[in-house]
Amino acid sequence: MIIKYASIFVLMQFVSMQAFAQTNSATPGTKQAAAQVSESQADAEWISYRNAYRLMIQFEKYGKSKHLIQSHFQVFNKATTPLPDNLQLNLVSKSMRLNLPLDALGRASFPLLKSAYDENAELVLNQASGQLNFQSRISIVARADGVYEVADLRLACEQALTYLKSVGDIKADAKSCVGVRFSYAKNLLQSGIKFRGADMQMHALALQENSAFPDDSNKAYKTASLRFADVTEKSQVLVQLPPIAIAPLFE
Amino acid sequence: MISAIGWVYTRLQLISMKSILFASLFCVARLACAQTPASSIMPDGSSDMYVGLGVLSEPSCEVGGEQTTRIMPNVQMQWSNGVFLRNTNLGMHLSPSSDYEVGPLLSYQRGCSASAARKLAGYGDVDGSFQLGGFFNFRPLTNLRVGTKLLLGTGAGKKTTYLNIEGRSYYKLASHHGLVLSSGVTWSRRYFDSANSRFDPNLADGSHVSVAGPGNIMTGSGSEGFTWKSTKPVFNKNANVRNIYLGLNWNWDLSSSWIVTSHVTATHQFDIDKDSLWLGKRNYVTVYSGLAYRF
């Protein structure tokens, strides 16, 4: 009895695998895309757009204040090595192939598209690597004038923490805001990042090699951290070059 | 290949019409293969559906009966307006927040074929029944979701209740492999539904002897009639379920469209008293494995 049904099940899976292989090779619209697929589709890293949508829509639907923070879709490396060069993220479905540009940290703006959802699209990386994974990433919005009030930075950090707690992020569990971290590319010599205290005295903030976000393992960035405990509310951070990211720090 | 499909098709046809109908309404709430999304997490006017087929092995009745293996469809649907269908649970998310989920729920409780339980021999099937109630899910810890269900209905002219509390945690094993560990308790009060029986339980009380409906004509064999007369409590059987279970659900995403879902649940049944309709099977295992298409 069991053997009979098990064999039906195995057959069923075999049939589906065949169908699955056929739909995959028929998916891309262009010849070039088809060539890429035949090279790497087998083990190229992908994620269901619907699953990613479910992750990313939370920030859109979030009702509390969030004007100082932003949400990105991030490709990250589980190992400590940096992301591979020429890494590309594409949104692929029956009727579309959309490139989502990645920044230095592997972050992309996530498009909320009904058509991609309805077509059950996939987000596909152009490189096969078992080490790459996806997540949502919250950071503090950079200011065009480069002038940050410490009170605003503290508020931004609180917004990030409140949001992460609301979505049940383990990183925010039982933590509080202690500071922010500005990060730059490793080859930067001088960030020109300064701190102006309540006494209007300017101090340079020391740069150190670290990860852009505290939970990242890739420490290949020049970072300047500011701890709220060390400064007064009325001080400012003055930034000449726009940072790659501004991360909230929780402890 | 075609002959193989034909063979599968023939095997499927062998399943009786009744069991197909039954299966399409069948409720295995704990088999929920796909994550159940909250109402507002898809674009307006969109839907997320899984339809699959798999092999299920479980006792032929919810408690007791022989372990049987059969083909079982698996249907999970979710619409952007909050309505969802999970096998035979039809419900609606009313909560605006993702912190908790709340809403009404209509559920089909499966019955039991008379041939599956010795105690039912000769008395007819226990019918499945619809129950109406609600669900409330919340997240007390980061990786713990607690789901509660309370359902009320009527079976055999008596009120039936069903209460289930379950905790679930999700673990990502590797990319495309996810594991859900669940554990819960079920408390359900139901009664033997005599609607299909050749004997009217009311007759046993002696109160409605004069009312001889078509269902009351004693055409049963002599020995059954005798049993009925001599042991009155046989008609006061309950179909209660009080159990605790531990489940393991493994999902493997083959692509954004295909998913292999497998499930093992071990159940321990409490207090099967002498009035209980079911065979006294205290521990049993339910296994499901199947393939689903997401569209």
Image (cartoon, helix red, strand yellow):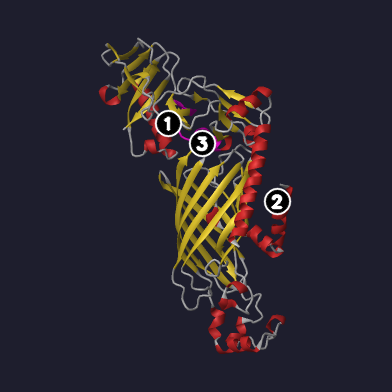
Q: Chain of mark 2?
A: B
Residue B44 is situated, as x and y percent measured from the top left of the image, at 62, 38
What residue sits right under mark 3 in the picture? A55
Q: Which residue is mark 2?
A: B4
Residue B235 in picture, x, y percent from top left: 57, 80
Nearer-the-camera pick, B292 or A223: B292
Q: Which residue is mark 1?
A: A78
Secondary structure at numbered mark 1: loop
The residue positioned 31% from the left and 19% from the top of the image is A234
Question: Which SS class for mark 2?
Answer: helix
Is label 2 or label 1 in front?
Answer: 2
Discs 3/1, front: 1
Label 2 and label 1: CA atoms lie apart by 43 Å
Query: Residue A163: x percent and y percent?
Result: 43, 34
Q: Quadrant of residue B219?
A: bottom right
The chain holding disc 3 is A
- Amino acid type at image mark 2: Ala
Q: Which mark is residue B96?
A: none
